[in-house]
Image: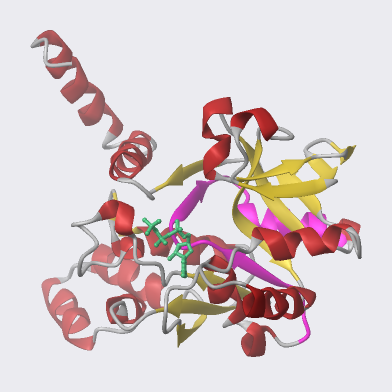
């Protein structure tokens, strides 16, 4: 099964951290963000993964490649745990890379995956959205896709004040708990115009029709090519479904989100959690928060 991970964006909201360091390589606790995403795809059954990069993101390829020198040093030291972790990264999936030459938006990045995905349904996972869940979020969507035999996109209920940041859906009929046949999708609506608080987040199961629509819209737009506009074309054809995935999403798109993501993941680690709580107790007792 094939997955595409767009990771070619400029990450301008995280500058200056992202001046040379790709956003997707920013650490979240002890791993770069994109490793969580590749692990989710791999554990979800996607064994061929295309990462969309750009000329300044070669470091992502290096991260998933073998590093013999480091392995030798770890072997000599008897650092078995670290060695196993390195081997696990290298064995995640067959990884492929293509570059997006100009940052023309998410739709344009997905379009680069056209020849890789060929005629099959495929997954798209955004490289800067991490979803912590027992069952990999993308697998949950794939299973829904097998039931409805149509594209399925991941949804999350967001606070009313945040709808302007996302693509928002009109959920239509709930065909089973958390799975909706969508009536419409709208990109970044005003709070008063939003059809719901269900936001499209970074997980999708799509099929090759999306490329035809992306290509058509590409010729009509001068600026960024959105994915949402082309997703809407499914609604009046084979149908588009949305699913509220079970899990917890952490986003690293802005500096405060990235900091929160680190804390949230740290709190899930049984060894680190007590240290974080202790630190916050200390800050509180000193009146610093
Ligand atoms: P974002 O819009 O959140 O990322 O895209 P960005 O453009 O890098 O960030 P800002 O707004 O400038 O801070 C969501 C995902 O889509 C990828 C990004 O790398 C990110 O993983 N993306 C975005 C592309 O691959 N190409 C693009 O042209 C835009």
Q: Give the range drawn in magenta.
A: 119-146
Q: Using residue 54 as the reference point, say whether residue 219 is left or right of it.
A: right
From the top left corner, tell me how far across and down residue 126 is, in percent. Answer: 52, 61
The number of numbered discs placed on residues in the rendered structure image is 0
Task: Give the quarter of the image for residue 9.
Answer: bottom left
User: Dividing the image into four equal quarters, which quarter contains ligand 1?
Assistant: bottom left
Q: What residue is rendered at 16% in x and 24% in y? A: 279
Visible residue check, residue 136:
no
Q: Using residue 109 as the reference point, say whether residue 192 is left or right of it.
A: right
From the top left corner, tell me how far across and down residue 25 is, in percent. Answer: 31, 64
| 144 or 4: nearer the viewer | 4
* In the image, residue 78 lies in the stretch drawn in magenta: no
From the top left corner, tell me how far across and down residue 105 is, in percent. Answer: 51, 68
| 254 or 78: nearer the viewer | 254
Task: Give the quarter of the image for residue 264.
Answer: top left
- Quadrant the N terminus occupies: bottom right
Identify whether 255 is placed above or below 195: below
Q: Using residue 130 as the reference point, say whether residue 55 is left or right of it.
A: left
Identify whether 51 is placed above or below 224: below
- Quadrant the C terminus occupies: top left
Identify whether 26 is placed above or below 71: above
Q: What residue is rendered at 24% in x and 62% in y? A: 18
| 204 or 94: nearer the viewer | 204
Task: Give the quarter of the image for residue 145.
Answer: bottom right
Q: How was this image coloured?
A: secondary structure
Visible residue check, residue 71:
yes
From the top left corner, tell me how far across and down residue 53 is, in percent. Answer: 41, 78
Q: What residue is rendered at 53% in x and 80% in y? A: 50
Q: Using residue 11 as the reference point, say whether residue 151 is left or right of it.
A: right
């Amino acid at each position: 099964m094939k997955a595409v991970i767009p990771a070619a964006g400029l990450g301008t909201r995280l500058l200056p951290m992202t001046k040379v360091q790709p956003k997707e390589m920013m650490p979240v606790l002890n791993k770069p963000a994109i490793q969580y995403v590749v692990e989710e795809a791999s554990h979800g059954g996607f064994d061929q993964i295309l990462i969309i990069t750009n000329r300044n993101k070669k470091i992502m390829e290096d991260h998933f490649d073998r590093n013999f020198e480091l392995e030798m040093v770890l072997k000599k030291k008897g650092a078995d745990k670290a060695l196993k972790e390195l081997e696990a990264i290298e064995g995640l999936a067959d990884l492929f890379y293509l570059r997006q030459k100009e940052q023309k938006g998410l739709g344009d990045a997905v379009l680069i995956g056209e020849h890789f995905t060929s005629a099959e349904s495929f997954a798209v996972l955004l490289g800067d959205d991490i979803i912590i869940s027992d069952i990999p979020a993308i697998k949950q969507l794939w299973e829904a896709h097998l039931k409805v035999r149509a594209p399925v996109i991941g949804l999350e209920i967001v606070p009313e004040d945040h709808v302007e940041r996302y693509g928002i859906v009109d959920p239509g009929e709930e065909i089973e708990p958390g799975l909706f046949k969508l009536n419409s999708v709208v990109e970044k609506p005003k709070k008063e115009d939003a059809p719901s608080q269900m936001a499209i987040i970074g997980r999708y199961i799509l099929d090759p029709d999306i490329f035809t629509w992306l290509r058509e819209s590409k010729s009509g737009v001068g600026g960024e090519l959105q994915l949402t506009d082309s997703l809407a074309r499914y609604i009046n054809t084979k149908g588009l479904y949305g699913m509220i995935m079970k899990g917890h999403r952490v986003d690293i798109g802005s500096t405060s989100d990235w900091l929160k993501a680190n804390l949230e993941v740290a709190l899930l680690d049984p060894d680190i959690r007590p240290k974080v709580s202790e630190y916050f107790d200390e800050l509180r007792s000193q009146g610093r928060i």
